[in-house]
Image (cartoon, rainbow, N blue to C red):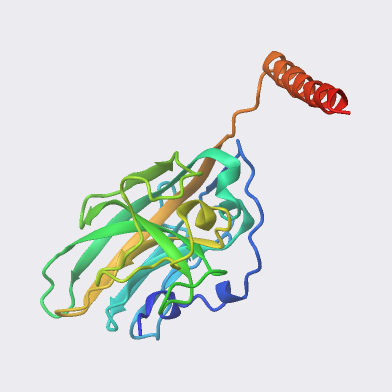
């Protein structure tokens, strides 16, 4: 069985209904100044670690801070299903998602040797599960994290919200080559019902468990509204439609 988001601890997400529409032309910045603000991170047993709202660490403080010994090798994940970050992405001309991240410590648990890890953003649709998953999702690699690099900003702008196929850089397969999208689902259809977004550091299937100390801050979404015809263009379009209608009416009258 492909584990994906079942192991990710997203019990609340499977209950989500069809997502609300985001506001085209709007933007949201979560800087965690008022708490976790609808975001959740990896949570484990006390020996494994957890995610906390850290008022002493951030870019600027506070931040969402995860200290976790990844015994199950499932990686890290920060996610939300709040209306500001979900909904119908196709209503906007483009969508930009970003975050600040600080890889304070990432190392092999038993040796202390540091490791570099990729970080992805996932767009998730729970209404159309892929084979073996409880959702369909697509992913984009934002970058590679290396311990000790301090805070860095990572982002992606999605400009092809109406595309049936995946834009360059986006993937719909997991590390084993299995599809993460339902076979009858297009990219645009997934974007029209985004139920959750997540920033994810994949787990390590082979080798030793990893120890993480990673903080995220200033998670953002912004969108460019779809183009609206100028008044003159709209008037010309309306006049054209009326002309077509009148022409069709005359044609029908001539046949009587």
Q: Indicate the quadrant containing the C terminus: top left, top right, bottom left or bottom right.
A: top right
Q: Is residue 157 left or right of residue 112?
A: right
The percent coordinates of residue 68 (x first, y second) are: 32, 74
Dividing the picture into quadrants, the one containing residue 207 is: bottom left
- Relative image position of residue 233 (x, y in whole percent): 67, 17
The quadrant in which residue 159 appears is top left
Residue 79, position as x, y percentages in the image: 48, 64
Left/right placement of residue 256 relative to residue 238 reads right
128 vs 193: above or below: below
Query: Residue placed at 51% from the left, 45% from the top?
Result: 221
Residue shown at 23% from the left, 53% from the top: 144
Along the viewing direction, whichever of 1 and 42 lies nearer the viewer = 1
Image side of residue 110 versus residue 33, left or right = left
Q: Quadrant of the N terminus?
A: bottom left
How many discs appear? 0
Figure quadrant of residue 109: bottom left
Q: Of 116 and 182, which appears nearest the observer?
A: 182
């Amino acid at each position: 069985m492909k584990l994906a988001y079942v192991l990710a601890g997203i019990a609340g997400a499977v209950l989500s209904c069809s997502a609300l529409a985001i506001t085209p032309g709007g933007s949201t910045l979560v800087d965690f100044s008022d708490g976790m603000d609808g975001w959740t991170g990896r949570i484990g047993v006390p020996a494994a670690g957890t995610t906390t709202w850290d008022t002493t660490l951030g870019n600027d403080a506070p931040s969402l801070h995860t200290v976790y010994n990844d015994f199950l090798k499932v990686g890290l994940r920060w996610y939300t299903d709040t209306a500001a970050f979900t909904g119908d992405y196709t209503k906007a001309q483009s969508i930009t998602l970003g975050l600040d991240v600080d890889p304070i410590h990432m190392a092999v648990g038993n040796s202390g040797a540091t490791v570099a890890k990729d970080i992805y953003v996932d767009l998730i649709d729970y209404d159309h599960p892929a084979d073996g998953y409880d959702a369909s999702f697509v992913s984009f690699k934002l970058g590679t994290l290396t311990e000790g690099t301090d805070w860095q900003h990572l982002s992606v702008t999605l400009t092809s919200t109406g595309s049936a196929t995946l834009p360059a850089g986006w993937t719909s397969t997991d590390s084993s080559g299995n599809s993460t999208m339902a076979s009858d689902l297009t990219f645009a259809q997934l974007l029209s019902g985004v139920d959750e977004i997540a920033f994810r550091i994949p787990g390590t299937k082979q080798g030793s468990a990893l120890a993480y100390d990673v903080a995220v801050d200033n998670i953002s979404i912004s969108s460019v509204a779809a183009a609206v015809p100028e008044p003159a263009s709209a008037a010309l379009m309306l006049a054209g439609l009326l002309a077509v209608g009148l022409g069709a009416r005359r044609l029908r009258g001539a046949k009587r």
